[in-house]
Amino acid sequence: MNNNFKRTFNAVKMSRKRQEEIRAGLSSLLYEKHKEGYLMSENTISSKKSRVLVIVIAAILSLSLVGFAFGHQIIQLLGGGRIEQGKTSDGKDFVSIDAGFISDPVKVENNQIYFILDGSNTNITDQCSDSSYYKYETTDDNGYRHVVLIGGTADNIGFAEFVWDKGGNFLGSNASTSSSEKPEWLKSATSKLLSK
């Protein structure tokens, strides 16, 4: 399986069964593309394009896998994606989350990191490193708690978003990082956020 998909599955929290269903669908899609001669080289795609590619494929797969859902609910993510939850026609519960961020919550200028998701253009460089992160938290109009994390360095930046419902129940998270390994800042943040 493509390394971009492996990173996505490592970053997104979902049940093992759902993960296997999506993995099988993606593998099938990649096999079909391979047969048609549309091979993609990981070395020729920048990390930004890789993130967008993963998001697009995950969104297409998400729509095809849950298109038959009944009474589903969509929760918009601050990073531009969404969480979709509901029941299938045979009564089974499902949760689907878009992988990665559609638009970056930061910009990097002159080796400085600026948080722009909330429009503040706040310099967060001193709060970000390989082991530390900047945390932005808000509650949306529907009562969902969103926590966005920025970690890493100006040349190796990463993002994550965690979401809880009105009752404080954790719904899911996603992340965009440039490494296949989970960075130290994300391990630390995940431990703190999910241990409460």
Image: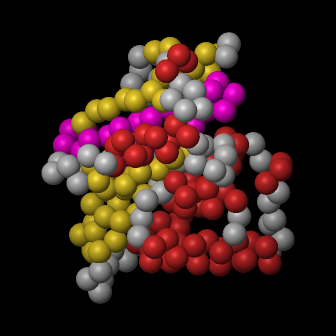
Report which quarter residue 32 is drawn in. Answer: bottom right
Closest to the observer: 103 or 130? 130
Front residue of 70/142: it is: 142
Q: How many marks?
A: 0
Q: Residue at x 53, y 25 (%)?
A: 128
- Span highlighted in magenta in the image: 140-162
Per the picture, the main secondary structure of the magenta-coloured stretch is: strand
Quick check: can you spot residue 39? yes
State which quadrant residue 111 falls in: top right
Taking the view exactly as shown, the residue that stands out farthest to the bottom is: 90
Residue that appears at 36% across and 41% down: 192
Question: Residue 111 in magenta?
Answer: no
In-front residue for pair 116/1: 1
Quadrant occupied by the N terminus = bottom right
Asked whether residue 146 is drawn in magenta, I would say yes
Q: Would residue 41 be found to the left or right of residue 172 on screen?
A: right
Residue 105 appearing in the image: no
- Residue at (23%, 54%) from the top-left corner? 169
Q: Position of residue 168 (x, y in %)?
A: 20, 49
The scheme the figure's colours follow is secondary structure
Q: Measuring 34% from the left and 43% from the top, which residue is drawn there?
A: 193
Q: Is residue 185 above or below residue 122?
A: below
106 displayed left or right of 6: left
> In this view, which residue lies farthest toward the left?
167
Percent across and percent down for residue 24 are 58, 78
Query: What percent of the width, then of the height, locates residue 147?
Result: 35, 38
**Residue 133: x, y in percent?**
48, 30
